[in-house]
Image (cartoon, rainbow, N blue to C red):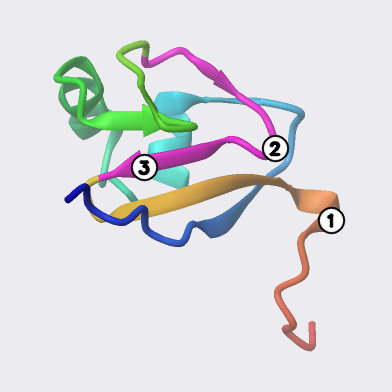
Amino acid sequence: MPAATPEPFDVPIRDQSIRLGQFLKLANLVESGAEAKPVIAEGQVRVNGEVETRRGRQLVPGDVVTLGPAAARVTDEASFEDDLPW
């Protein structure tokens, strides 16, 4: 039985796109760019359900990145609401 896909959490980005390695850091899925390189190269990262081995892969709002049990969705910063009072 395949593992259930985790519910992704939203991670807003400022620009129209972001590189996969940068997004992994921004989403706190890895601690550094140095840590991102091997997990991507080893095929541990999925983008929209497909294994992705290119660290420079451009992600756009709506893309879902999965690493292990965690999943993060790229969102547009302008449409992101965090319900904080400030």
Which residue in the structure is indicated by mark 2?
A: 61
Task: State the CA–CA distance, disc 3 to disc 2.
Answer: 15 Å
Name above or below for residue 65 compared with residue 21. Answer: below
Q: Is residue 68 left or right of residue 78?
A: left
Image position, residue 82 (x, y; %): 70, 74
Image position, residue 45 (x, y; %): 29, 31
Task: Indicate which disc, 3 or 2, sits on the residue closer to the N terminus.
Answer: 2
Task: Indicate which disc, 3 or 1, sits on the residue closer to the N terminus.
Answer: 3
Which residue in the structure is indicated by mark 3?
A: 66
Classify mark 1: residues with Cα within 10 Å, few (<14), some (14-19) or many (20+): few
Classify mark 3: residues with Cα within 10 Å, few (<14), some (14-19) or many (20+): many
Name above or below for residue 67 compared with residue 58. Answer: below
Q: What residue appears at the point 79 percent right and 88 percent down from the top-left corner?
A: 85
Q: Quadrant of the C terminus?
A: bottom right
Residue 85 among those drawn in magenta: no
Front residue of 45 and 35: 45
Q: What residue appears at the point 36 percent right and 42 percent down from the top-left corner?
A: 66
Task: State the CA–CA distance, disc 1 to disc 2.
Answer: 10 Å
Residue 64 among those drawn in magenta: yes
Image position, residue 64 (x, y; %): 52, 40
Looking at the rendered structure, the secondary structure element under dot 3 is strand
The number of numbered badges drawn on the structure is 3
Residue situated furthest bottom in the rendering:
85
Q: Which amino acid, by three-letter code, is at mark 2?
A: Pro
Magenta span of residues: 55-67
Name above or below for residue 43 compared with residue 5. Answer: above
Task: Indicate which disc, 1 or 2, sits on the residue closer to the N terminus.
Answer: 2
